[in-house]
Amino acid sequence: MPCFRGVLRINRIQKNKKNVTLQKKIMEQFIPQLIGTGITLLVIFILRELLKRMILKYAGKSARSEHKINHIIRVCMIFINTVGAVTLIAIWGVHPRNILIAISSVFAMVGIAFFAQWSILSNVTAGIILYFTNPFRVGDYIRIMDKEIPLDAQVEEIYTFYTHLRTKDGTLHLIPNALLLQKGISILEGL
């Protein structure tokens, strides 16, 4: 019996040595990628913080609303994260052909979605136009001049696709941004 335990112990020690050797080989093989990943994540974090501070500093000098500033920050963070993801993919050695196939598949799906829902693209474009031209602001009372459904309401939020309007009776209306650009709008004073 003591001999059998000794053989088991020797086998266990040999397996542990093989596992340690395998782990060392794996670590040695992936050290550059791990270092590159760490550096990339650090750079992404630093860029996000610097860009956020720069935007907030600019916002203090301009008359932009907090809602708009937060939206700009969100868009910039998405861009930085996307660049970071592409960098990490390159660091880990994913074949460019595979990346191009994945990207083309995503663009094909997005293209089909936009073709099927052309109004989405027009609402996004209208949202961007409303965002930068400021025909009305959050908190303004506006009148949408529509023959069928005229609407007097306060602007609660302006989003990428819709603008939230609340009437005096408390009803929340979600109006597509494209409609706000197509219809005449009056800003009502003193309500």
Image: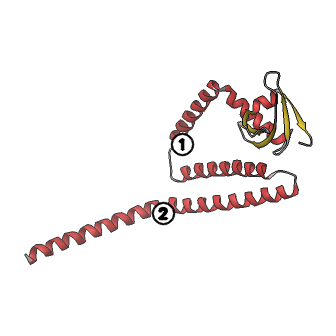
Looking at the image, residue 111 sits to the left or right of residue 63; the answer is left
Label 2 vs 1, first from the N-terminus: 2
Residue holding disc 1? 96
Task: In the rendered view, tell whether residue 20 sits above or below residue 101.
Answer: below
Quadrant where the N terminus is found in the figure: bottom left
View extreme (right): residue: 189
Neighbor class of circle 1 (other Cα within 10 Å; few <14, some 14-19, many 20+) is: few
Q: Quadrant of residue 159?
A: top right
View extreme (left): residue: 1
Residue drawn 84% across the image and 43% down it: 137
Q: Position of residue 32 (x, y in %)?
A: 51, 61
Q: Amino acid at mark 1?
A: Pro
Looking at the image, residue 18 sits to the left or right of residue 101; the answer is left
Residue holding disc 2? 31
Q: CA distance from mark 2 to mark 1?
A: 22 Å
Quadrant where the C terminus is found in the figure: top right
Secondary structure at numbered mark 2: helix
Task: In the rendered view, tell whether residue 51 sits above or below residue 134.
Answer: below
Q: Position of residue 113 (x, y in %)?
A: 60, 29
Colouring method of the image: secondary structure
